[in-house]
Structure formats: structure tokens, C-alpha cells
Image (cartoon, rainbow, N blue to C red):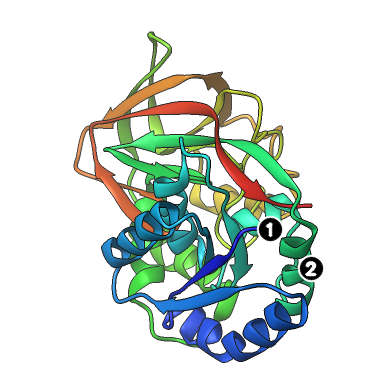
Amino acid sequence: MQPLCLIVNPNAGGGRASKRLPRAEAALRARGFAFRVERTTSMEHARELARGAVAAGEAPVAMGGDGLTGAVAGEVRGTDAVLGILPGGRGNDFARKLGIPFEPEPACDVLAAWQVRAVDVAEAGGHAFLGIASAGFDSDVQDIANSTRLPLGGAVYAYSTLAALRGWRDAQWHVEVDGTPYDFSGYSVAVANSGVFGGGMQLVPQASLDDGELDVLLTQSAPKTGYLRNLPKVFKGEHVDEPNLVFLRGKEISFHADRPFTAYADGDPIADLPVTIRVRPSALKVLAP
């Protein structure tokens, strides 16, 4: 086992990461780890800390939400370093996909087991992401989720979806998957690495982290009432047979719409449209069950 650099976003999960930090430190000591703790002030600061940890021969451990994990992973990808995860955000979707427990003590057990798994990473706009990059209706949802101060926890995404749906109008989309074009009218384009986002929504349940490809979901036009009715199905992945959904797969995906949108990934803005997303197969080594 390498020494650890615990990179903590103190504001993640409404302060959840800060509250859990003493438990995590105690658990790491009990398991014999040498470690240091660094608190982030921004995502760029988190990336800087991750680069420093890799250079020092430490294993960076992200303690925060999916945004922090994605930022740290972006600096670990393509190196010999391994990434550790101690969930501390609202969604924790990458940890969920990997089967990493949310509580600090069992999550530290995963670190102590030191089981290294190689997973794919997606890249857009020069940045890496782990979960799902999406734009369109999902952009509006994420804007609301990021701005709300209501203490909703993981339910913030369901609340934001309802709020965004009221003023939504369909966009016109042009998408290319490995050079093959697709044009449609509708809600959104999502490009999935892990397939999970929004606090446990199984948007693309068939997505794999180690198949060397990205899964693409085109959500075409449908009545708002139908969209709302199907929303609960997404948490269990039971929506996939809906007629307005088109699932594709590829290694390079480009898309834009007839009006401006920002693509979000791992809860943070990653690129303005138009955007091209590519997969880097097995580029990230992560400690996971």
C-alpha cells in the first residue's frame, strides 16, 4: 500500500465530507495507513493537489462528490498512480457504480484491501469525466440543482427535474457517433461512461466501465406528462423500452443543438456545445471491490 493524500472538498454534500473526515482519519489510522489531508478551495486546486500527490508517489483519495472525484481522476488517468474514493457528496454515483460503501469505515476497508481495477475514462473539452456528460434538458436541471440552497440531499435532482420541466421546449439536435449522423427533436443527449447520475438514476443501466466504449442516449420529443411519469423508472433502470429513447454506442461522439447549452458531467460544467467526447479505455486505476 502507498501513502495516501486525502483530498477533501469541505463543502461537498452540504458539509457532509467535513463532518465525516474525523471518522475517515480514525479509520485510516486503525488500518495502518500513512496519510496526509488536504482541503480544496476549488476544482483547479483539487487538480493541483492530485498532481502533487502523483508526483510524490502517493495515492490520491478523493473525499467529496462526483465532481471532485472526476477532477482528481483526470490527473491520475494515464499514470501509474491509483485513485481511492471516500464518498462525501450528495450523489456519489461513481462510488455507487463501483460498489464502494458510502460510510467512511467500510469505504476505508476497500482502500485497505488495495484491489486495483482499471476503468475507462471519458474526455470532453480537455477535461476527464467518469459518469455521464449530458446537455439540453439535463443542463437546465443541473443549473437548478447547483443553485438551490434547499436541504434536499440526493432528492435535489428530482426536485430540479420538476422545476426545469415547467419551462422546457424541445431542441433540435445533430449528433455524430463514430461518424454516423443522427438528427432529432427532443430533450437531451447523454454520453455515458458509468451510466449513473443524479443521485442513483440508472440512466444507462447497461453501461460498462471497462468495455472501451461510451453509451449514448438520445431522448426524443415526448409529452411532458409522459416524461414525468417515467422519471421514477429511471432510478431502477426500467425506462429503457420507452419509444422516445434511442441507445447507441461508440468511441467518439460529437453533438450540438439549435440553441446554446452547457454540457455537465459529474455535477459540474464541462464544455459548451458543440462538443466532442472520446473514450480512453482502461486509463484509470481505481481502488474498488
Query: Looking at the picture, does residue 88 appear above or below residue 3?
Result: below
Q: Position of residue 280 (x, y in %)?
A: 48, 28
Query: Looking at the picture, does residue 104 appear above or below residue 133?
Result: below
The answer to whether mark 1 and mark 2 are in CB contact below 8 A is: no
Q: Which residue is mark 2?
A: 109
| CA neighbours of label 2 inside 10 A, class few (<14), some (14 to 19), many (20+) | some
Q: Residue at x 39, y 52 (%)?
A: 55
Looking at the image, is mark 1 or mark 2 earlier in the sequence? 1
Identify the secondary structure beneath mark 2: helix
Q: Position of residue 198 (x, y in %)?
A: 55, 59
For the residue pair 240 and 147, the one nearer the viewer reads as 147
For the residue pair 80 and 232, the one nearer the viewer reads as 80
Identify the secondary structure beneath mark 1: loop
Q: Residue at x 56, y 49 (%)?
A: 227
* Name of the residue lying farthest toward the top: 180
From mark 1 to mark 2, how far is it between C-alphas? 13 Å
Toward which corner of the image does residue 184 lie, by quadrant?
top left
Q: Residue at x 60, y 54 (%)?
A: 94
Q: Which residue is mark 1?
A: 1
Q: Position of residue 83 (x, y in %)?
A: 56, 53
- Residue 220 appears in the rendering: no
Of badges 1 and 2, nearer the viewer stands 1
Q: Is residue 255 left or right of residue 190?
A: left
Look at label 2 and name its amino acid.
Asp
- Residue 277 appears in the rendering: yes
Query: Looking at the picture, does residue 46 appear above or below residue 284?
Result: below
Q: Position of residue 35 (x, y in %)?
A: 56, 74
Q: Is residue 175 left or right of residue 18?
A: left
Look at label 1 and name its amino acid.
Met
| CA neighbours of label 1 inside 10 A, class few (<14), some (14 to 19), many (20+) | few
Q: Residue at x 63, y 84 (%)?
A: 25
Q: Quadrant of the N terminus?
A: bottom right
